[in-house]
Image: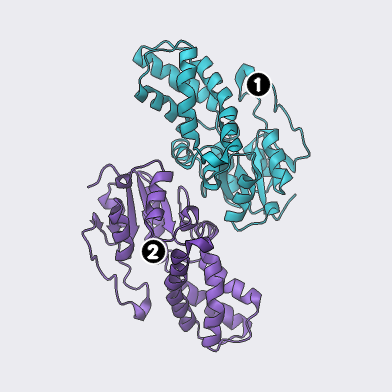
Chain colours: A purple, B cyan
Amino acid sequence: MPTDVKALLFDVFGTVVDWRTSLIDNFTKWGNAKGIDGDWIGLVDAWRGAYMPSMDEVRKHPDRGFVILDDLQRKSVEPLAARLGITGLTSADFDYLTRGWHSLEPWPDSVSGLTRLKTNFIISPLSNGNVALLTNMAKHAGLPWDLVLSAEVFKHYKPDPETYLGAAKILGLRPEQVMLVAAHNNDLAAARAVGLKTAFVPRPTEYGPLQNRDFGPEGEWDFVVKDLNDLADKLGC
Amino acid sequence: MPTDVKALLFDVFGTVVDWRTSLIDNFTKWGNAKGIDGDWIGLVDAWRGAYMPSMDEVRKHPDRGFVILDDLQRKSVEPLAARLGITGLTSADFDYLTRGWHSLEPWPDSVSGLTRLKTNFIISPLSNGNVALLTNMAKHAGLPWDLVLSAEVFKHYKPDPETYLGAAKILGLRPEQVMLVAAHNNDLAAARAVGLKTAFVPRPTEYGPLQNRDFGPEGEWDFVVKDLNDLADKLGC
């Protein structure tokens, strides 16, 4: 057990919150109230599909400056809605959809697990979501973060090494004093490559029927746990 | 009442925590245990005296890069100790003294007031202390911040406008949706100059017998309160 760990950093989308079910429920109810019969499942899945490529554009072109996730998501959603035949949405409607990412619901174990882990560790997100998104989500979902770290603070999206190393540095810690907790093997691999400790938590329903990876650990992670309460058990919290 | 305010940002040293009493108590006990009979009151007061000038050096020379407060404090304390005749301190001892700023005690109303305010508002420090310092202090003192904003995030010390405006921007808010709470009129004046709302809370014993200002409000602040519980009362929390 890496007893020298002082801070636990959490991937958020998929690891702490169930973005897919939350967005589909939100948009379905909203669409019904507005009389818009859209393919919200299709939109949410396509939107998440656009997530990595939109960040990769920022990562590949640092000269263009950092663009926060809210702005990337707002830009992605409009053509996706058109492609799916969801018409008649106003600019304010697209703002509403984008804002949906600020009010995602936690997995059942997230709040209790984080609350336990907070007693012995500094706990923070380390997410590609921007600070406002993560802050509003924490208020909405009751996530008891000690602080909010985001790609936005370091001007680098994961899996750039600057994000992981920047988080350790801003906490005044060495990389091995920080552990990333994530449901995604690629995120953990990038964190481990620069010296962080790692913990894998499977979220096999994250992508619904589209899930095709991350059903189990694919690396020698320091911890493999069932959920965040299991992590608290294993860390003696 | 500025009902559109979504986030309350707090000056920390003096406003939320009693740095002077905390440091004097800490160093006196530590000195006694180590058999070092130093003028700890003199050291703490002199150290705080070096605080503004050391940040002003950073503010005046942005080309040299931003230097976090921990590093400024560490650099200041060694010559001050020598000047006060406190000898025999090792590098690790100076690290200990510097780390003292991470474990300051809150004023009696701080934790209860912040806990109430957190129910209706985003609450965050907006301090010249670095992120690690503020995070460790929050763990030590039980300050229930939603997130930790610091001059370090914006690479500008208060009262530079970039600090206040950077905080509003990173929260996705307009300046008038953010209120600075501080015991220092100059901090509030700088915040108001760039459009933030302001609340003054007097801390007339902050500097002990050396206090020569900030006994009362010196501007048309949006709120003047007795303490953080009074602010919670006035904001309906």
Q: CA distance from mark 2 to mark 1?
A: 51 Å
Q: Nearer the viewer, residue A135 or B194?
A: B194
Q: Is residue A142 above or below residue A13?
A: above
Q: Please rate how many residues cluster around mark 2, counting C-alpha atoms within 10 Å: few if below 14, some from 14 to 19, many from 20.
A: few
* Furthest residue in direction bottom, as rendered: A85
Residue A234, percent from left and from top: 25, 51
Q: Which residue is mark 1?
A: B211
Which residue is tagged 2? A108
Identify the image quadrant of residue A201: bottom left
Q: Could you say which is closer to the camera, residue B159 or residue A101? A: B159
SS class of the residue under badge 2? Answer: loop
Question: Is residue B25 positioned above or below A99 on the image?
Answer: above
Give residue B99's mark. Answer: none
Q: Residue at x 42, y 56 (%)?
A: A126
Amino acid marked by disc 2: Pro
Query: Which chain is indicated by disc 2?
Result: A
**x and y percent of residue B104 in the render?**
49, 30
Let me know if residue B104 appears in the view.
no
Residue at the spot 42% in from the left edge and 61% down from the top edge: A12
Please identify the quarter of the rendering in which residue A127 is found: bottom left
Q: Find numbered disc 1 in the image and state the secondary structure of the residue it sits on.
A: loop
Compared across the picture, whether B52 is left or right of B100 comes to right
Q: Nearer the viewer, residue B70 or B61?
A: B61
Residue at figure coordinates x 73%, y 41% from the top left: B223
Q: Of the residues tagged 2 and 1, which is closer to the observer?
A: 1
